[in-house]
Image (cartoon, rainbow, N blue to C red):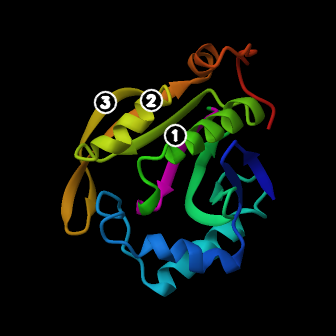
Amino acid sequence: MIFRSTERLTLRDFREEDWVGVHEYSRDARLTYYLNWGPNTDAQTKAFIKRAVRHQSEIPRTHFEFVIIKNETQEIIGNCRLISMLHRHRSSELHVIIRREDWGKGYGAEAIDALLALGFEEFKLHRIFSVVDPEDAASARVLEKCGLQREGHLREHLWVKGQWRDSLCYAILDYEWAQLNGKPIELELGDPVV
């Protein structure tokens, strides 16, 4: 199922056969350096794909994980997700990964913009957040470019690859996103209908 298309990208649900394209970048030690996983083995990538496919049939669905396809070539260039959607609090965590050969071309920002639109327009979320390693300045810049604001510095809250790691927390609220994008938004007060 296609969830969003942009000028250059398509975000769609994972299929089991996507594991080959996803594994091309998920085994890359440089790409996964700041992440809390990877580099992946074949088995780890296949398990990730199976889990993503399984989430598609959950009711209610709270994990929306998508493969990112470059429209021009139909290549898999990354993946992205809105996960752990808390319906009562209308909040979700955002992640985007772009393969190294496509860094610096604006694909990350384009995918984030598509996820923000999906989250705020379709799912009526109030808050979308993301965390990045403090040393990953490029990812922090992309989040800021998309309108997310730095909210805090989480100190040594993750044990990753044999060491304690910090994270910077970035977030954007529905009305901030609407204002940045010149869109009217009806603020929903109180508990949403699930």
Mark 2 sits on what residue?
145
Q: Which residue is drawn at 75% across and 61% down?
A: 58
Residue type at numbered disc 2:
Lys
2 vs 3, front mark? 2
> x, y percentage for residue 40?
41, 77
> x, y percentage for residue 145?
45, 29
Q: In which quarter of the image is residue 30?
A: bottom left
Q: Which region shows up in magenta?
A: 90-100
Q: Residue at x 63, y 66 (%)?
A: 75
Please say whether residue 96 is one of the residues in the magenta stretch.
yes
- Residue 29 sits above or below residue 123 on the image: below
- Residue 139 sits above or below residue 40 on the image: above
Label drawn at residue 152: 3
Depth check, front residue: 182 or 45: 182
Q: Is mark 3 on a helix, strand or loop?
A: strand
The number of callouts visible is 3
1 vs 3, front mark? 1
Tags 2 and 1 in contact by the CB under 8 Å rule?
A: yes
Q: Is mark 2 on a helix, strand or loop?
A: helix
The first of marks 1 and 3 along the sequence is 1
Mark 1 sits on what residue?
109
Dominant secondary structure of the magenta stretch? Answer: strand
Q: Is mark 1 on a helix, strand or loop?
A: helix
Quarter of the image where the C terminus is located:
top right
Depth check, front residue: 142 or 190: 142
